[in-house]
Image: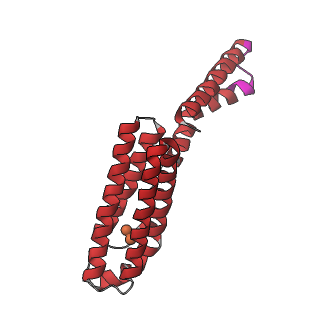
Amino acid sequence: MNQNASMFGFSLIILTLIVAVILGFMAGPTSPLTWILLAALLAIPFLYRKLAAKDFLQWKSEYSVGIDSIDQQHKKLVNLINQLQTAVKYSTGEEFEREALDELVGYTKTHFSYEEGLMEQNGYPDFDAHKAQHVKMIKQVEEVLAEYEKDSDTAMNNALNYLSDWLINHINGTDKQYSRFLIDKGVK
Ligand SMILES: [Fe+2]
Ligand SMILES: [Fe+2]
């Protein structure tokens, strides 16, 4: 559901509840149903915040690779994905969306270079396979970016889903495989 549709849905529910509560109090404030409806009305802002938070990625301590410099970069990537999600969700316009997407793709490349540098300098045995995953991901993102020129809405949603799934799976899987090796080499 897009942001406008969900705002309309919530407004309608709030309005219906307000009317029901007013009618309930007019008919007699002793009805338990009136108090239940009032409680539901008061719970709406809390539920709305919970639902809105579901669309955003949350950094979890389990994502840590145990190397602070890399964790910081991974956290920044999560923030940039959320920034792009915000730009799309709140329909901030194509210019903002494109800026957020470019920033995310640019920083992803910077991060990959940093990680590859550390792996290469320290003689990480799976360097080639790990780098191949980075290269493949960038190629797929570039294909999505080319799609953006033709159909920006579909391409943006594809880019968001692809980038957030790929990055979390990669951070939580492939990146963790180098942790012990690089930590033992003294990487921080
Ligand atoms: Fe990484
Ligand atoms: Fe990686």
Q: Does 36 appear in magenta?
A: no
Q: Seen from this angle, which residue lies furthest top? A: 26
- The residue at 59%/30% (across/down) is 10
Q: Is residue 60 visible?
A: no
The magenta segment: 27-35
Residue 73, image x and y in percent? 32, 62
Q: Nearer the viewer, residue 139 or 112?
A: 139
Q: Is residue 80 visible?
A: yes
The answer to which image quadrant residue 137 occupies is bottom left
Q: For ligand 1, which image quadrant applies? A: bottom left
The answer to which image quadrant residue 25 occupies is top right
| Quadrant placement of the N terminus | top right
- The residue at 50%/60% (across/down) is 165
41 with respect to 127 (left or right):
right
Residue 112, image x and y in percent? 33, 68
Q: Nearer the viewer, residue 80 or 50?
A: 80
160 with respect to 44 (left or right):
left
The answer to which image quadrant residue 36 occupies is top right
| Quadrant placement of the C terminus | bottom left
